[in-house]
Amino acid sequence: MAVTQPTLLVTVDRTKCCGYTLCATEGPDVYSIDDAGYAVAMDNVPAELEGQACRGAEACPDGAISIQRIGPTE
Ligand code: SF4
């Protein structure tokens, strides 16, 4: 099985996150909610999860998620 290169760096600004969980609803394989109720994102997102990463970021009402491209698109 081929190893997929990470393509996106996803970060959550916890000072902006209010724990609405919409990111985890839209991107359950990229985002999770920690015990304190804040979002945690997979650091390096592979190409097959780009859609979830972007949908989760777009769903965040607080603009707490930033995405930076670190690798090639598929
Ligand atoms: S949608 Fe935004 S505010 Fe809600 S948990 Fe995710 S990062 Fe936090």
Image (spheres, rainbow, N blue to C red):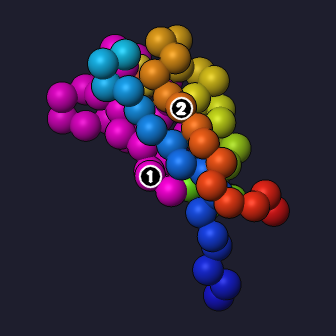
Residue identifier under label 1: 43
Asked if residue 39 is positioned above or below residue 46 in the image, the reply reads above
Neighbourhood count class around disc 2 (C-alpha, 10 Å): few under 14, some 14–19, many 20 upward: some
Ligand 1 within 8 A of label 1's CB? no
Identify whether 31 is placed above or below 19.
below
Judge whether 21 appears above or below 3 on screen.
above
Locate the C terminus by quadrant.
Answer: bottom right
Determine the residue located farthest toward the left in the rendered image.
36
Determine contact: label 1, label 2, CB under 8 Å.
no
* Amino acid at pointer 1: Asp
Q: Mark 1 or mark 2: which comes first in sequence? A: 1
Q: Count the numbered circles shown.
A: 2
Residue 49 is covered by the magenta coloring: no
Residue closest to the far bottom:
1
Q: Position of residue 62 (x, y in %)?
A: 47, 12
Q: Is residue 21 visible?
A: no
Residue sitting at x 41%, y 32%: 12
Amino acid, disc 2: Ser
Instruction: Locate residue 7 relative to residue 27 in the image: left or right.
Output: right
Q: Does the magenta portion include 43?
A: yes
Give the residues drawn in magenta, as a range: 17-44
The residue singled out by tag 2 in the image is 66
